[in-house]
Amino acid sequence: MAAKPSLAAFVARVIAFAALAFAAWHFAAKPLSLACGWIGTRVVEALAPVDHAPAAYRDGQLVFAVQPDYVTSGRRALAAGTVYDVTTSARVFTYGLPFFLGLIVASRPRRLVAKALAGTGVIVLLAGATVGFDVLLNLTMLRTNAGDPLFGFSQGAREAIALGYQLGAVVFPALAPVVLWIALDWRFVESLRSAGAQPPSDEEHQHAEQQD
Amino acid sequence: MLRTAILFVVIVVALFALELTPPGQHFFVEPWTTAVARVSAAAIQLADPAVIATGAVLVSTKTGFAVAILAGCNGVEAMIVLAAGMLAFPAPWKHRVVGIVAGTVAIQALNLVRIASLFYIGQWNRDAFEWAHLYLWQSLIMLDALIVWMLWLRSLPSPRSSPA
């Protein structure tokens, strides 16, 4: 019975730190979105027939200015320099970040800062890739005035883009924070079981980490 | 850890793949989502008789406000992650089954609270609804699954006495 308050205290710490992290995440929307936008641009430029797809931050949204490449422009008789604006949001793919930070700060592993930064990097990378797939998904739906697809994506490419988007939008935001935390502080999880019910006290946890 | 991690990834990928296939959607996700909407409507009707469910859509006959319960709002993703976590971790099968059933109940109970709260938050303020819907409740549902998993871990017999 003595173990229950410890787990409750851990959960209370998670909620408290996650609330702080949510506030920080809210105010850091612009730099976070721009980082995701930069990664999204790399994904779009690598996978779609475009010359450029730079991202800009406007009113809380990411706006990608997608310029079709020379071949696509020629095939579709587009005016030189034609640009298509595609709007998306990075925030809906990064909400797991404050939750992850709440978990990792609450469990206080050794090398906390390095682990928090590593997890943040992975979540931003996944969110940025998802932003890219969101833009690609929009590009698959663009039509010319005649109603033909603007970009010549194959059926397989369209399905791969849809799958990438589904994974990034539905699976990763929920899964990544928990999986990253468990991977980065496995000793905490092991101690839950080996202690027969009792999460380690902070001192025990730190001590176990130092013997690692 | 490596064995558990690999097993977890394999199981979670398999379950999510099953969920995303057309048969998975047709035979499990859509009926489940409709059932969630009906149960939510029944629960809300206890306090507010002006609420009805049409398929996976909750409607207030008083204000005309409606919310559609879609993939991502039915708790299935959290159930998959929790089930994968319990199946991947070395444990007796009896504990796994009990854990998955109890976890499903816990996740769906909180999901019911989520749907009811969003239904009324949406009628009050659109921005608050978006924030609660897209960011806050998603994290709380995952935290719920994580708490169930940690409680389940603590309930396991010690590794020495476990046959698994």
Image: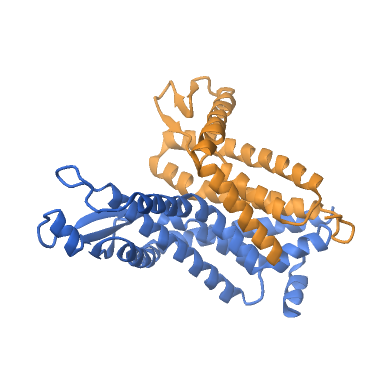
Chain colours: A blue, B orange
**Residue depicted at 54% across the width and 68% down the height:** A119
**Residue depicted at 64% across the width and 37% down the height:** B109
Q: Which sits in the foreground, B127 or B5?
A: B5
Q: Is residue A72 left or right of residue A122?
A: left
Task: Say if A171 sits above or below A125 in the image.
Answer: above
Q: Which sits in the foreground, B161 or A203?
A: B161
From the image, which quarter does the C terminus of chain A lie in? bottom right
Task: Say if A212 sits above or below A4 in the image.
Answer: below
Q: Which sits in the foreground, A80 or B72?
A: A80
Q: Which sits in the foreground, B138 or A147?
A: A147
Task: Say if A66 sits above or below B99 in the image.
Answer: below
The quarter of the picture where residue B4 lies is: bottom right
Residue B137 in sight in this render: yes
Task: Say if A138 sits above or below A105 in the image.
Answer: above
Query: Residue A43, position in %: x, y?
Result: 36, 64
**Residue depicted at 52% across the width and 52% down the height:** A171
Query: Residue B62, position in %: x, y?
Result: 43, 21
Query: Residue A195, position in %: x, y?
Result: 83, 62
In this view, the residue farthest toward the right is: B161
The quarter of the picture where residue A105 lies is: bottom right
